[in-house]
């Protein structure tokens, strides 16, 4: 054992991975357990600073320090990469058995970024970390390793700049750095919720501020600095009792932060500093007699030793379990996941982590290079073989042959007329569009029908997504984001969400219709003459994993899984389909009562086309009707158009 080994830090690691694990398992009381990752960052800051300063004292010339940096980086790579590569390879193999071709291709793509410590950038550019669908992204948890590696590259330069100062000045520099980080974070929060800058070819345009603060190293570096500051504090002269109290207080601060913080908290990046302060107290008072046994014991040290492997394996296991069972995990499955994760991480620690730390293991560099090459080749094979579609049975292959209907509704691009947060869909000339489509992403679902209408009228059509504070959920009275010349307005929305209350359906739909009626009071929309509203679609019961993923799971493994039954609303205890029907009933009723006084109005009810007493169609004539569980495919939209074609033609006359 290393003479500089600190058992309490392994105990703190155990606490950190424990609360992250329980957060991912959605255990009540651990809704803020994601702060465990922030604690890991602080621990890394403390350990890297202590290691670097211990070794830098041995050398005085720049050349030796360059060699020191390369040696340090080499050790960091051997620390992180072998276990990561093994988990990636194991997950790709499991994905071959379990995942649909689409999900396998995505997993293979993300595996390359993960193995190169770039997954934080990959997932940042793609989506929000807190989105529900991320539960099925096998490697999304590796975003933290991207931050960790960025820190490993940047920290030596920071330490090199400050090591000539005395401890008091270094502590001051660390303190100022942390305060400046908070100021920067608060400035970004105040500019939220999204970035509207057009710099850097609009890479950040439309991105959520919360994702920028979450995924990018400039807004995480202060967490490592917390750890550095602890190292430079002089030895304590406090009494044994005071040390014990402050050690316990550190634990309480971590637990308090878990209860205070949640995924949607606006100031999440600042509040986490309370847990960092608590972790700092635990490390600083690591020698507090008796109370340090809370962390310095066999169980905590064991979990701490395997904490890195446990962090790597627990999330893929959770994701695969959810993918297999398509339900929220029950107590038995959660317990099984915990046992499997600990067993597998113990094996990885023993047979992967420990051997690769050994300098005498001569083949460790070759093993890493070969393994990385294998990940690349396997990922390319997955992509070039369309996710190994041969794993599917004949019926699935027939259905897959017409899967193009689930492609993106349009090729979105930035508006050339207005400065907007979201990209638009346009067919023809945006400036002269006689038809506009407004609403959320569900409005974009109806863009193919809008194009058909535009073609009939020899006109252009543009879809503006989430303008006017996500109209029609909000009024347009004070909205001047766009100034269209359109005469026809098409509106779509997720009218009823899973958070809605049944007793609010009537009042909510009335409010939506009144918001739409406010168009007549806004001079920017004064030319609107006709309004088409598309009602609530019969969103599928499982609102996480797409039915497309379920339908194309390899049937040799999922032979008896009936996706249609699982996703359908028939015999649904929550009666969601009936609620959707009620929403549409009131949209049509209030639309005819209110909107017809000022506009020509048509309501189209998708439920009447897609559903009957036996359930709602999920596919027909080998065409899948859902892009995901609350968005229809082009095939479904075209089917609805044919069903309402006569009404639409009469409306346009």
Image (spheres, rainbow, N blue to C red):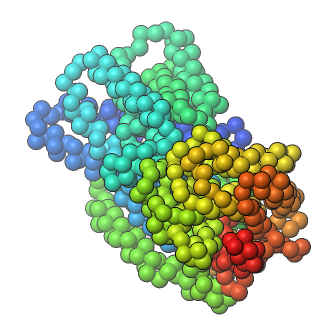
- Which one is in front, 132 or 453? 453
What residue is drawn where x is 71% and y is 76%?
Answer: 649
- Pick the residue in front: 546 or 602: 602
Look at 33% across and 54% down and name the residue there.
Answer: 201
In this rendering, would 549 be left or right of 106? Answer: right
Query: Residue 57, position in %: x, y?
Result: 20, 30
Q: Position of residue 25 (x, y in %)?
A: 66, 49
Against 350, residue 21 (above or below) is above
Q: Where residue 648 appears, x then y in whole percent? A: 72, 73
Q: Quadrant of the C terminus?
A: bottom right
**To which quarter of the image does residue 638 belong?**
bottom right
Taking depth in this image into account, of 582 and 157 the one nearest to the observer is 582
Q: Is residue 269 above or below residue 452?
A: above
Whether residue 70 is visible, yes or no, is yes
Left or right: 227, with 612 as reference point: left
Q: Residue at x 53, y 26 (%)?
A: 274
The answer to whether residue 9 shows anywhere in this view is no
Residue 636, horizontal then vertical, whole percent: 68, 75
Give the quarter of the figure containing the N terminus.
top left
How many marks overall? 0
Specify whether 30 is left or right of 644: left
Quadrant of the rendered image containing residue 438 = bottom right
Compare residues 347 and 176 and report the one nearer the observer: 176
Q: Residue at x 36, y 39 (%)?
A: 218
Q: From what the image shows, is residue 548 above or below residue 140?
A: below
Quadrant of the rendered image containing residue 605: bottom right
């Amino acid at each position: 054992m290393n003479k500089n080994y600190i058992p309490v830090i392994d105990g703190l690691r155990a606490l950190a991975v424990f609360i992250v694990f329980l957060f991912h398992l959605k255990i009540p009381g651990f809704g803020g357990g994601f702060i465990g990752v922030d604690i890991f960052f602080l621990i890394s800051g403390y350990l890297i600073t202590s290691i670097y300063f211990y070794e830098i004292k041995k050398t005085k010339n720049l050349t030796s320090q360059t060699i020191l940096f390369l040696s340090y980086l080499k050790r960091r790579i051997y620390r992180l990469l072998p276990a990561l590569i093994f988990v990636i390879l194991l997950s790709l193999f499991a994905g071959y058995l379990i995942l649909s071709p689409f999900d396998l291709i995505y997993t293979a793509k993300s595996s390359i970024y993960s193995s190169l410590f770039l997954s934080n950038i990959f997932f940042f550019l793609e989506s929000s970390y807190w989105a529900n669908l991320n539960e099925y992204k096998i490697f999304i948890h590796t975003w933290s390793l991207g931050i960790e590696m960025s820190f490993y590259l940047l920290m030596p330069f920071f330490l090199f700049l400050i090591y000539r100062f005395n401890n008091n000045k270094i502590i001051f520099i660390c303190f100022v750095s942390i305060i400046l980080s908070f100021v920067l974070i608060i400035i970004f929060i105040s500019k939220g919720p999204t970035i509207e800058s057009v710099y850097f070819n609009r890479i950040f345009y439309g991105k959520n501020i919360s994702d920028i603060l979450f995924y990018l190293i400039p807004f995480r570096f202060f967490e490592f600095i917390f750890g550095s500051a602890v190292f430079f504090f002089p030895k304590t002269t406090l009494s044994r009792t005071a040390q014990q109290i402050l050690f316990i207080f550190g634990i309480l601060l971590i637990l308090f932060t878990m209860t205070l913080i949640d995924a949607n908290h606006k100031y999440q990046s600042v509040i986490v500093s309370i847990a960092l302060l608590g972790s700092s107290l635990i490390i600083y008072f690591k020698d507090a007699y008796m109370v340090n046994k809370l962390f310095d014991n066999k169980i905590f040290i064991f979990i701490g030793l395997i904490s890195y492997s446990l962090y790597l394996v627990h999330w893929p296991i959770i994701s695969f379990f959810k993918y297999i069972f398509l339900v929220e995990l029950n107590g038995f499955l959660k317990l099984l996941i915990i046992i499997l994760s600990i067993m597998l991480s113990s094996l990885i620690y023993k047979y992967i982590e420990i051997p690769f730390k050994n300098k005498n293991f001569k083949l460790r560099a070759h093993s890493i290079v070969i393994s990385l090459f294998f990940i690349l080749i396997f990922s390319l094979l997955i992509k070039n073989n369309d996710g190994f579609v041969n794993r599917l049975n004949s019926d699935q292959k027939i259905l897959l042959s017409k899967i193009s209907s689930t492609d993106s509704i349009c090729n979105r691009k930035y508006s050339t007329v207005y400065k907007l947060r979201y990209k638009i869909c346009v067919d023809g000339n945006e400036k002269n569009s006689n038809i506009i489509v407004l609403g959320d992403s569900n409005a974009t679902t109806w863009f193919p029908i809008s194009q058909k209408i535009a073609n009939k009228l020899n006109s252009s059509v543009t879809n503006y997504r989430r303008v006017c504070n996500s109209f029609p959920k909000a009024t347009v009275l004070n909205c001047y984001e766009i100034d269209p010349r359109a005469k026809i307005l098409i509106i779509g929305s997720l009218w009823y969400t899973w958070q809605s209350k049944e007793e609010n359906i009537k009042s909510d739909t009335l409010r939506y219709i009144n918001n739409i009626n406010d168009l007549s009071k806004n001079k920017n929309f004064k030319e609107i003459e006709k309004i088409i509203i598309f009602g609530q679609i019969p969103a599928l019961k499982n609102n996480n994993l797409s039915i497309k993923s379920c339908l194309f799971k390899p049937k040799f493994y999922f032979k008896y899984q009936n996706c249609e039954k699982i996703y359908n609303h028939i015999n649904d205890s929550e009666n969601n389909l009936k609620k959707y029907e009620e929403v549409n009933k009131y949209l049509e009723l209030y639309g005819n009562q209110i909107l017809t006084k000022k506009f020509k109005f048509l309501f189209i009810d998708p439920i009447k086309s897609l559903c009957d007493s036996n359930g709602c169609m999920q596919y027909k004539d080998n065409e899948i009707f859902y892009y995901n569980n609350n968005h229809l495919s082009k095939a479904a939209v075209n089917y609805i158009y044919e069903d309402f074609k006569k009404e639409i033609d009469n409306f346009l006359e």
